[in-house]
Amino acid sequence: MILADTSFLVALARQEDENHARADELASKAWDKVTTTDLVLSEFVILMSRKNGNRQAHMAGEKILQSEILMICAVHEDLPSALELVRITPKLSMCDAVSAVVMKKLKIRRVLSFDSDFDTLGFERIF
């Protein structure tokens, strides 16, 4: 399994994104093994709305929900560990911290991300 981060999903959805071609290539190789979290989906829809408007964000979010991607919902028990990770890694977003906690819990070692924040957390970033 491999976790898709927001930066990867945005690059995949937006043809004008500088990383679109690479994201498309990676998705074609690993899409059947991809998982993400509900917080990543939330962050993705917010960013897509800012970049492309609410209608495009809605369609892109629906496309993810209808895909084969496995959606993992963060649970209450994950949040204290994620908050602690944010405290000790000041530039880390709560969304990325939750992803890291979920990845550790599920023994996911690889992340599809154009975001270097994962480099310091001990995961293999595919970009």
Image (tube, rainbow, N blue to C red):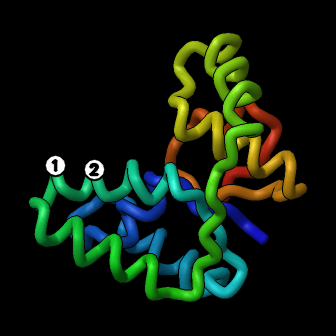
Residue beneath the point at 28% across and 50% down: 46
Q: Position of residue 30 (x, y in %)?
A: 66, 81
| Residue 80 as seen in the image, left or right of residue 41 | right
Amino acid type assigned to the residue bearing label 1 in the image: Arg
How many labels, in total? 2
| Residue 14 as seen in the image, left or right of residue 21 | left
Q: Quadrant of residue 127?
A: bottom right
Nearer-the-camera pick, 79 or 24? 79
Which residue in the structure is indicated by mark 1? 50
In the depicted structure, whether residue 119 falls above or below residue 20: above
Q: Residues within 10 Å of mark 1 (few under 14, many from 20)?
A: few
Nearer-the-camera pick, 107 or 119? 107
Residue beneath the point at 36% across and 68% down: 20
Which residue in the structure is indicated by mark 2? 46
In the depicted structure, whether residue 13 falls above or below residue 111: below
In the depicted structure, whether residue 66 falls above or below residue 113: below
Q: Quadrant of residue 107?
A: bottom right
Q: Position of residue 68 (x, y in %)?
A: 58, 87
Nearer-the-camera pick, 109 or 23? 109
In the depicted structure, whether residue 111 falls above or below residue 57: above
Viewport quadrant of the N terminus: bottom right
Residue reaching furthest to the front: 76
Amino acid type assigned to the residue bearing label 2 in the image: Ile
Asked if residue 112 can be seen in this view, the reply is: no
Residue beneath the point at 49% across and 87% down: 67
Q: Residues within 10 Å of mark 2 (few under 14, many from 20)?
A: some
Q: Report the Cα–Cα distance between label 1 and label 2.
A: 6 Å
| Residue 97 as seen in the image, left or right of residue 91 | right
Q: Position of residue 100 (x, y in %)?
A: 72, 42
Marks 1/2 in contact by CB < 8 Å: the verdict is yes
Label 1 secondary element: helix
Q: Quadrant of residue 123?
A: top right
